[in-house]
Amino acid sequence: MFRSKATSPPGSYRRIVLLYLCISIARLNSAAGEEDLLLTVRMKGSADGVGLTSRKVAIEQAQQRIMEEVLQSMTHATDMTLFNPILRQTSRYIPRYDLLRTDIAGETTEVEIDAYVLEKPLRRDIAAIMLPRLPRKPSVQLLIADYVGPGAASGGPTFDIAETVLRKALEEFEFTVRGIQDILDHYEVAQLLEIIQGEMDATASFARANGEDVVIVGAVTTVHEALATDSNMLTNRARITLRILSGTDGKASDTLAAEAAVQSVDPVEGGTQAAQDACGKLTTDCIVGVVIAMLGLEDESRVIFRVEGPNSPETMTELEGMLRAIPGVSEIESLFYSPTLARLAVDYGGTMAYLSDLLAGRPVNGRKIEIGRCVQREITIRFK
């Protein structure tokens, strides 16, 4: 039966259904390895009465509290109503627990448990719930080097194999995706390889300087082994490792890895196919990682300032001094500075309307503040 255009599901609905489908398939593919991704959380619970039934209720209360605590830490949400589908299935995410102690205080049973929370399925279900509720579609910068073939280590990598696979998956959800071609005007290839291969500080600095919501950095490597001594067939094994970082503060929110193997005569052809297969295994987790990273922008205790055209460090020093004097501001962290763009993270518990009204028109280093944009807990200011 064919469906006409007039009755087709809207694009956002199809994307949500697609994400649920991707998550379901990913669960089947990776169920065996998810036991390794456990969060251990200790919590107390209590229930009226004594006996086995009361102890069971107390344990269930402790598990419920654990799920709420983990959800709050991952999403920065205080209202748990959205996550009722998750909270109603606590046992799916906590496959086991250790009962540390049971106490009886009068007519009350008190317990303390160590619960082992399955992180990966929980993150996937959070992403499925929160994807349609993001304040905007995220922008993502991809920087992934492909070392495919026996000569890749000496000849240098390409940057197209992993980027093509991940770009297609991310754009399916209408994420804005930027690749290697978007940054070559600002970086030499040698610099980009240092960012990929270097310490976390260099990667975090790149993420903060980039200007996108989320940055995915990584590499694909291949090894090629003869299938048998008397055969020209090769087993080509590919491994991809990725780091997902917040473009706002450069903090890593996830690390992903996958492997795949393909047999072929040509090592480059087989290595390319193996690399594509390995990347394909991470598409769902990349989408989930981007959504989780975006939720970090929803921290109600933190405001991200985007400062356009500060021109000098003196402007930022004076601006920071002004912010420190505002009631409710407790801490300021400089995330990135250049003469054309700077970013600050400000711990602030007040309302954004009060903050923007207070700053608008205030003089800083000979110029006046102009509020360019104020959405959720992000504010863009410029000077005139």
Image (cartoon, rainbow, N blue to C red):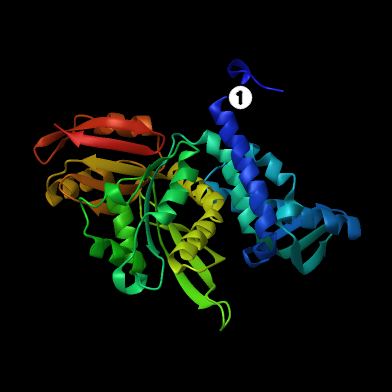
Identify the residue under disc 1.
9
Q: Looking at this view, name the residue that lies furthest to the top.
A: 6
Q: Quadrant of the N terminus?
A: top right
Question: Can I make out residue 299 in this image?
Answer: no
Q: Position of residue 122 (x, y in %)?
A: 63, 52
Horizontal side, residue 9 vs residue 321: left or right: right
Which structural element holds mark 1?
loop
Residue visible at 54% across and 43% down in the picture: 77
Q: Position of residue 322 (x, y in %)?
A: 22, 43
Q: Position of residue 345 (x, y in %)?
A: 33, 49
Residue 36, image quadrant? bottom right
Between 142 and 312, the one lying in front of the other is 142
Q: Amino acid at mark 1?
A: Pro
Residue visible at 90% across and 60% down in the picture: 52
Number of marks: 1
Between 270 and 250, the one lying in front of the other is 270
Q: Looking at this view, name the residue that lies furthest to the left.
A: 366
Position above or below: 200 against 154: above
Residue 111, image quadrant? bottom right
Question: Can I make out residue 345 in this image?
Answer: yes
Q: Quadrant of the C terminus?
A: top left
